Amino acid sequence: MTIPNHITPDTDRFLADLDALHQIGPFETGNHRPTFSPEDMESRHWLVRQMEEVGLVAEIDGIGNVFGRHPGPGPKLLAGSHIETQNEAGWLDGALGVVAALNLARAGLPVDVVAFADEEGHYGSFIGSRSFTGLLEEEEIDRLSNRYHGKPLRDALAEAGLAGKPRLRLEEGRYKGFLEMHIEQGTTLENAGQGIGVVTGIVAIWQYRIIFEGMQDHAGGTTMAERRDAGLAAVRFLSWIDAEFPKHCDARTVWTCGRIALSPGAPSIIPGRAEVLFQFRDISVPTLERLDEVLRRGVVESNRRERCTATLEVMSQSRPAPCDATLQDCLAGAAEALLPGGWQRMPSGAGHDAQYLARVIPSAMLFVPSIGGISHHWREDTKREDLAMGLRVLAEGARRFLAG
Amino acid sequence: MTIPNHITPDTDRFLADLDALHQIGPFETGNHRPTFSPEDMESRHWLVRQMEEVGLVAEIDGIGNVFGRHPGPGPKLLAGSHIETQNEAGWLDGALGVVAALNLARAGLPVDVVAFADEEGHYGSFIGSRSFTGLLEEEEIDRLSNRYHGKPLRDALAEAGLAGKPRLRLEEGRYKGFLEMHIEQGTTLENAGQGIGVVTGIVAIWQYRIIFEGMQDHAGGTTMAERRDAGLAAVRFLSWIDAEFPKHCDARTVWTCGRIALSPGAPSIIPGRAEVLFQFRDISVPTLERLDEVLRRGVVESNRRERCTATLEVMSQSRPAPCDATLQDCLAGAAEALLPGGWQRMPSGAGHDAQYLARVIPSAMLFVPSIGGISHHWREDTKREDLAMGLRVLAEGARRFLAG
């Protein structure tokens, strides 16, 4: 298949497609389409029809992935994202990447379009993209259930009419690469007044639970000297992290304590136990390892200083997924051509299906701004001109990469 | 009534009484007698019989107070505590003070014995002692319900056969003072190897809720510079308190953060809101006021420094209840006579019925050690010889005060 010298995607149709999908499972100004709910299945069947209209050979596979196969010869791009939403969430998120991919195909590019199932993790962790890349075993499917209402994944697949269907696997040698368009889920682009982010990679998340064990006591009868206050040990530890991490981080490293739980949590009882959830994210493994060392030193310091015992438990340490350099350069060239000076390179702080595709084929992502940085909330939104520019840059970047 | 020159309470009988009461509503090695439960009412009727055996005129009043009136002439002491327990709690706590009072009467002292209802707060806050001292209105009784199972206090009183009974009030001029014996609920005496604590007063508790409001955001997409992390603001505030309070406290001041709640409390979401429960306790009003100022300065500092808003809300500010100097001296003299060097003066960090009695008549408290400082737990215990010595000092102190 010959790659054209110039490409003009139909941005009006692209926006109309997004609006049509927005009508399925509406919630406030966003959408509620939890994985394998009736609304989610309606959206998957809607997508099949759109794929067929574009001339793709469409099907829904045994894990719920919606796959539209381009019938022409020659090397292809794979493009897409996911179509289900978080509960009561925004209208763009994964839908944007799927509809953008559809409109690359509509513009005449040799693109297979995919909507990976359950990126949002109602049942598991990236089960659609992991299935497609060979990282999901049948045993895990047997074991998974819905995190909100407990329904086994097998039952949900059966109710969706997908039981017994084969799971599609990535076809070796078919793709030059994978592209995923997404909203930024932050305010970096908005604050910079820019319209495009060329993603350098998807950060790894290293996640920990730190337990402080002291002695539960009466808050009146126990002198300060006698106390073994696990809550205070946790506060001092987090304060130490707050002082130390900036000395060892990189420019885009982020770290977060999302939960501090003191037991028993009563106003007049000295906490006997504190549980802290802590994570940091970066794209560089040496930086991640350096921060892991700092964290472990903090635990040692705490155990030296406090009359409570601190224990560190690793919950997960994912791998960073660097984006392909050539694909990045094609997207960057397209961005500079269409929006000179109005773009930047940036990491993705959030996880995406692209992180699993990046393990097997050259992959890249394109960000558009999100108003106020809002995501995973029904108020999530992006200006229509930013959406349109995103598609134009994505299409031009894809064209350059396919032609290259 | 003539006060004897010498008094020898029957410590064996005292311990036997405690053992008998321990049989009512047993739980592990402790007791479960929540206010107005069948077990609690059984213990109140048991107490009525003991009072009558000692020669007191006994009754249970309309709020559940068990009152045994000494029939003789002349000035009296009032003594007692409460008889219900916390859930699945210890066998001593309030029971000790009630049975000690009973055995003062048994030893021939002119003592009225009282078990105030619901000191443990299953329905309200010190409703028995507040009723007796004129600080409980009928409207509050109408409003109260059980904090665990929600039963209205009126229904519980009716089921206990107490509806419509009059509530007894302290008779003006009848008492020279009030005495309450209790376990320490801390390890100060145990650590000092001492057997008696002469309580200088019951500390006031000043209790606050501090709310930090920031911006809930994605822990991956939001750079450190963009964040308004309410959890981090709370940690920094508590760390500031940890550094500042020791500069302004007194020797026995205590302060406690019993709860830190981050919202939404998920590992990958920057907390948009943090709620901190904080309290401090001291016996001196100037010290309490100084710490209140420090706390308010901390909130101002936080609002100056952080991109989150801190708001301070006063939940309660009780009054300290200093113990009567003469009563203290009588107890101290008795302690030095019976256990030379084996006692100390100390504040009570926990609240007791004595704090309401102290508002209207000279009041004092005597502490005995608690093994490991345990209280409000079924493992609570005190050595039998310490219990016996407690009664002997209490009786000799009471004798000296009545004779004085």
Image: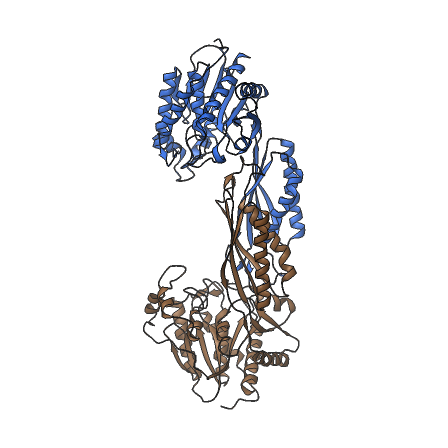
Chain colours: A blue, B brown
The answer to whether A306 is drawn above or below residue B118 in the figure is above
Q: Position of residue B134 (x, y in %)?
A: 42, 74
Identify the image quadrant of residue B201. Answer: bottom right
Asked whether A55 or B338 is in front, the reply is A55
- Tell me which residue sits at (46%, 73%) in the image: B20
Q: Position of residue A24 (x, y in %)?
A: 35, 30
The answer to whether A63 is drawn above or below residue B16 in the figure is above
> Could you tell whether B399 is left or right of B32 in the image?
right
The answer to whether B157 is drawn above or below residue B258 in the figure is below
> How many discs mark residues in the rendered view?
0
Q: Position of residue A32 (x, y in %)?
A: 38, 35
Can the viewer see residue A370? Answer: yes
Asked whether B166 or A254 is in front, the reply is A254
Identify the image quadrant of residue B42. Answer: bottom left
- Tell me which residue sits at (64%, 53%) in the image: A306
- Tell me which residue sits at (55%, 40%) in the image: B227
Can the viewer see residue A199? Answer: no
Quadrant where the image shows the C terminus of chain B: bottom right
Q: Position of residue A52 (x, y in %)?
A: 37, 17
